[in-house]
């Protein structure tokens, strides 16, 4: 089960990034041009937040079942714990939670804005903030903090 969830989490990252990028693009475009906020934009807003929530729930499940995190919990007070364990033990989970909170707040605020341009602006700004935090917290293959491949293979 753990390896399946790890693969799913690795693949879902791309859905999160793609939906966020597209929603930000639509938000910036609508904000700049003043086009109407249509049902498609509302569905995109909602589905982007939902995809981010699903990814977070998979991540939480992994967090509480991960041997890396178990090792971190067992040895957190020891000096010299490799940075990778601290990254996954605290930084990754905390920043990803913050990112999903930002996306959720942005989605909720955009839904409640009375004017279409304000909906696009709110969605673009809050989703961009969430994306920025996500990009910092992803263990990219080139990251000096903790690195993982683009897609996990077993």
Image (tube, rainbow, N blue to C red):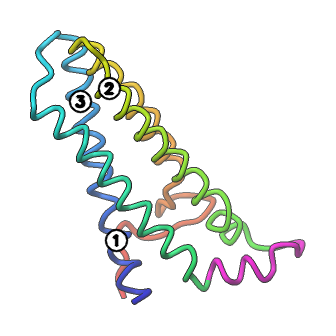
* Residue range corresponding to the magenta coloring: 68-80
Which residue position is annotated with label 1? Answer: 151
Which residue position is annotated with label 3? Answer: 25
144 lies above or below 75: above
**Spatial separation of the CA atoms under disc 2 and disc 3:** 15 Å
Query: How far from the left and from the top, in percent, is residue 72?
Result: 72, 77
**Spatial separation of the CA atoms under disc 2 and disc 1:** 32 Å
Label 2 or label 1, whichever comes before in sequence order: 2
Identify the secondary structure beneath mark 3: helix
Query: How far from the left and from the top, in percent, is residue 8?
Result: 32, 74
Identify the secondary structure beneath mark 1: loop
Q: Nearer the viewer, residue 61 or 77?
A: 61
Q: Residue at left 74%, top 72%?
A: 82
Identify the secondary structure beneath mark 2: helix
- Left or right of residue 113: residue 62: right
Q: Report crowding for label 3: few under 14, some 14 to 19, many 20 or more residues within 10 A (C-alpha).
A: some
Label 3 or label 1, whichever comes before in sequence order: 3
Which residue position is annotated with label 2? Answer: 110
89 lies above or below 95: below
Label 2 or label 3, whichever comes before in sequence order: 3
- Left or right of residue 136: residue 76: right
Q: Residue at left 12%, top 14%?
A: 35
Q: Report crowding for label 2: few under 14, some 14 to 19, many 20 or more residues within 10 A (C-alpha).
A: many
């Amino acid at each position: 089960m753990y390896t399946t969830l790890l693969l799913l989490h690795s693949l879902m990252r791309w859905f999160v990034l793609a939906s966020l990028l597209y929603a930000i693009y639509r938000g910036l475009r609508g904000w700049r041009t003043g086009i109407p906020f249509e049902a498609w934009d509302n569905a995109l807003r909602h589905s982007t937040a939902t995809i981010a929530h699903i990814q977070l729930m998979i991540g939480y499940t992994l967090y509480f079942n991960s041997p890396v995190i178990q090792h971190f919990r067992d040895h957190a007070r020891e000096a010299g714990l490799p940075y990778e364990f601290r990254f996954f033990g605290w930084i990754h989970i905390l920043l990803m939670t913050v990112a999903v909170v930002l996306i959720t707040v942005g989605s909720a605020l955009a839904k409640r804005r009375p004017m279409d341009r304000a909906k696009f602006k709110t969605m673009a700004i809050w989703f961009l903030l969430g994306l920025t935090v996500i990009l910092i917290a992803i263990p990219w293959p080139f990251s000096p903090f903790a690195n993982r491949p683009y897609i996990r293979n077993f």
